[in-house]
Image: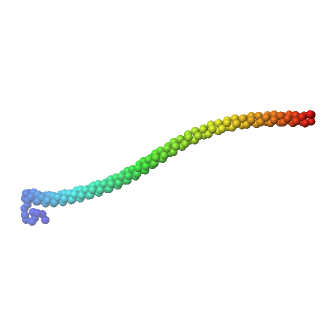
Amino acid sequence: MSEQGMGRTWTPYFYVARMIFVSEASLAELKAQLDEERDQRREEREKAAADLKVAVHKAQSDAQEELKQLSDAATRREREQQEVVNKLQESERETCLRIENLRTKLEDTRQKLVVSENKNRQLDTQICEVQLTSERRKKRVEELEYDIKGLRKELESEKQAAREEAWVKVFCP
């Protein structure tokens, strides 16, 4: 049934009022939906902000943990490197000490060698002198033996001459 059929006469104002009323109702409904949408978006933004805050906090936490691990690893490497440096320095000190000891021993050995060579030269000189003296004495002995031989021959000759003379005196009076 139409609105006129009900016995009422509707004026254009009524239609306008009704449209306004319907529009206001729609507007109120839209406004409520808009508010609800805004609230939902605000809640989503707040949730997103909270999630972002949690994610940032987790990322910072992870970054700090990673930084701590890297720092610990760097500290450990630095400590290990320092230990290597200390061992190398100790090894260098020991090597220098050994080298100094070897230099001292080498110098002692060199001096002993020089002393030994000097003694060797002295002994060589003494041996030469002894050999020379021995050669001279040997020559002298040979000369003396030669003289003794000559004297024996002379003595033998004199003995022979004395025998012959004695024979002559005995047998040839």
Which residue lies most toward the front here?
173
Residue 79 relative to residue 20: left or right: right
Say which of 51 and 101 sits in front: 101
User: What residue is drawn where x is 12% and y is 58%?
Assistant: 24
Residue 50 relative to residue 134: left or right: left
The answer to whether residue 59 is seen in the rendering is no
The C terminus is located in which quarter? top right
Residue 27, x across and y down, in percent = 14, 58
User: What residue is drawn where x is 74% and y is 34%?
Assistant: 143
Residue 160, x across and y down, in percent = 86, 35
Which residue lies most toward the right here?
172
To which quarter of the image does residue 55 belong? bottom left
Residue 125 relative to residue 8: left or right: right
Residue 22, placed above or below residue 136: below
To which quarter of the image does residue 169 belong? top right
To which quarter of the image does residue 28 belong? bottom left
User: What residue is drawn where x is 88% and y is 36%?
Assistant: 166
Say which of 2 and 144 sits in front: 144
Residue 131, x across and y down, in percent = 67, 37
Say which of 55 and 45 sits in front: 55
The answer to whether residue 2 is seen in the rendering is yes
Say which of 38 and 103 sits in front: 103
Residue 110, x across and y down, in percent = 54, 41
The N terminus is located in which quarter? bottom left
User: What residue is drawn where x is 27% and y is 55%?
Assistant: 56
Residue 71, placed above or below residue 170: below
